[in-house]
Amino acid sequence: MQDNLPELLSPKVDIIFKLLFGDERNKDLTINFISAVLGYKDGELEDISFYDTHLKREHPDDKLGVLDIKAKLSNGNVIDIEMQARSVPSIRKRISYYKSNMLTEQIGEGCSYLELKPVKSIIVADFDFIPESEKCHTVFQMLEKDEHFPFNDLEEIHVLCLKKLSKLNNERLREWLRFINSEKREEFMELAGIDPVFVKAVDVLATFSADDHNRMLYEARLKEWRDNKDRIDGALAERTQQVWNLFQQGYSLSEVEKLLSEAK
């Protein structure tokens, strides 16, 4: 492990997350992380191949999708790994769209549907992505409504909520999520003392953190997040004031809702 480590950049920022888990030189880290999420035993997942993260567009006016990390496993499964630091209203629909696109882009001219390989999305969220559950690791499939058996094995979404890390019983996965969630050098070093895989992970993160260009991109992304939050907070405060003013003028709740809807 490197001596005199620089200030380590947070893996929760998507730019650093992509460098850490989307680099061919460090794919052993990605294999270890994926194995922890999907429950593969050591050595069971032999290799991965990274793909272009831009999703294929069938038509010029199709929406462009860009994934954080996209890889094909040695068993043929296609994996999408996303770091989500902020919640947006469309996030669940966007993930479903990305997953469906990764299925359809497997079909080329003359290919059979029998050749389709399972697509698994892994979403690491730094907010309460699934408020319906207290679990840290939730898994979604297409299941029969009453008897809960799967329609097929082609689609699966794993959501990992960092805010619920204490609820996770899977020790191997918990250590990885602790690493991603770490912000202080001491936290990273503690994990490096637990498992050799984190010795390399810390060294890789330190190398990225020492790069001036990476730090510039990192700071730019943090500024973008802060600016977006300020805009959202400002819009919310303005809307709240509008509602209060209308109530003060004697409008009922239904009238306020109608006026605000018409004003959009």
Image (tube, rainbow, N blue to C red):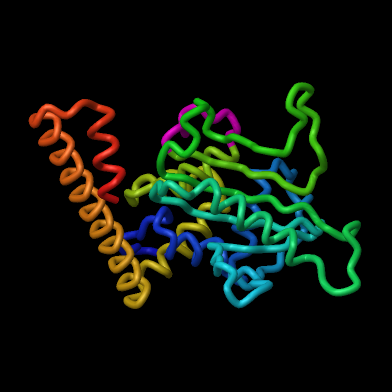
Tell me the magenta residue range. Answer: 163-171
In depth, the one of 143 and 134 nearer the eye is 143
Residue drawn at x 38%, y 45% is: 187
Q: Residue furthest top?
A: 146
Report the side of 193 relative to 118 (left or right).
left
Residue at 37% x, 56% y: name it.
Answer: 10
* Residue 189 seen in this snapshot: no
Q: Residue at x 18, y 36 (%)?
A: 243
162 versus 234 height, above or below: above
Percent across and percent down for residue 17 are 47, 60
Residue 96 is situated, as x and y percent measured from the top left of the image, at 61, 50
The mark total stands at 0
> Magenta stretch: residue 151 in it?
no
Residue 150, quarter of the rendered image: top right
In the image: residue 41, left or right of residue 109: left
53 left or right of 78 in image: left
Q: Is 4 placed above or below 81 here?
A: below
Inspect the magenta stretch and tell me whether residue 170 lies in it: yes
- Image coordinates of residue 196 in percent, x first then y, are 56, 51
Residue 117 can be seen in this image: yes
- Which of the 4 quarters of the picture holds residue 255? top left
The prevailing secondary structure element of the residues shown in magenta is helix
Comparing 217 with 140, the one in front is 140
Residue at position x 35%, y 62% in the image? 5
**Vertical side of 103 occupied by 153: above or below:** above
